[in-house]
């Protein structure tokens, strides 16, 4: 794993990668996904919002931990992780919103989904 991480992040310390990419960037990606979902926006907007976030993570790696500023593999890895976390947050928040906004129509079906509630026919035939 150390050799693979060294190829992706060009010799940066694993602690710096976990701190910046995992905790700071991942947390920001999750909150961005939630924010996009709470405004009932489309999920593709999460993807576009992650590009400046990945660029900011690259800059923090460069400024604080002397990493490479222009590293396409590191940027792509950060962007991929942020997009995945942001879309997970978007889907989980959308499921919560649908079931909270329309409790007579939808019920929760796991963390990321909802299902339509079957209406019982009040008149039996």
Image: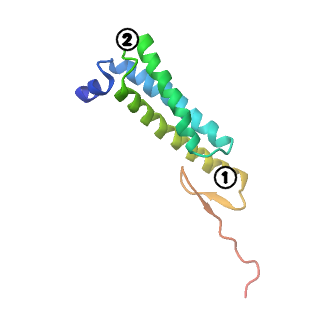
**Closer to the camera, 18 or 67?**
67
Relative side of 35 to 65, left or right: right
Q: Secondary structure at mark 2?
A: loop
Relative side of 86 to 123, left or right: left
Where residue 101 appears, as percent x and y from the top left, is 72, 51
Where residue 28 appears, as percent x and y from the top left, is 54, 29
Where residue 107 appears, as percent x and y from the top left, is 63, 58
Q: Residue at x 47, y 34 (%)?
A: 82
Applied colour scheme: rainbow
Toward the right, the furthest residue is 123
Q: Residue at x 56, y 47 (%)?
A: 91
Q: Nearer the viewer, mark 2 or mark 1?
A: 2
Dot 2: few (<14), some (14–19), or many (≥20) neighbours within 10 Å?
Answer: few
Q: Residue at x 76, y 82 (%)?
A: 123
Q: Secondary structure at mark 1?
A: helix
Mark linked to residue 50: none
Where residue 116 appears, as percent x and y from the top left, is 63, 64
- Is mark 2 in CB contact (under 8 Å) with mark 1? no
Mark linked to residue 66: 2
Dot 1: few (<14), some (14–19), or many (≥20) neighbours within 10 Å?
Answer: some
- Kindly identify which residue carries mark 1: 98
Toward the bottom, the furthest residue is 125
Q: Quadrant of the C terminus?
A: bottom right
Separation of residues labelled 2 and 1 (CA atoms): 44 Å
Toward the left, the furthest residue is 3
State whether residue 105 is above or below residue 122.
Answer: above
Which quadrant holds residue 3? Answer: top left
Q: Residue at x 47, y 22 (%)?
A: 57
User: Of marks 2 and 1, which one's residue comes earlier in the chain?
Assistant: 2
> Total marks drawn?
2
């Amino acid at each position: 794993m150390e050799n693979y991480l060294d190829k992706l992040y060009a010799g940066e310390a694993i602690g710096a990668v976990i701190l910046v990419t995992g905790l700071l960037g991942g947390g920001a990606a999750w909150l961005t996904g939630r924010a996009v979902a709470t405004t009932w926006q489309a999920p593709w907007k999460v993807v576009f919002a992650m590009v400046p976030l990945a660029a900011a993570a690259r800059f923090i790696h460069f400024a604080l931990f002397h990493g490479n500023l222009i590293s396409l593999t590191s940027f792509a890895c950060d962007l991929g992780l942020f997009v995945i976390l942001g879309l997970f947050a978007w889907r989980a928040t959308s499921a919560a919103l649908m079931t909270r906004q329309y409790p007579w129509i939808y019920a929760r079906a796991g963390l990321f989904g909802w299902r339509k509630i079957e209406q019982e026919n009040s008149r039996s035939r």
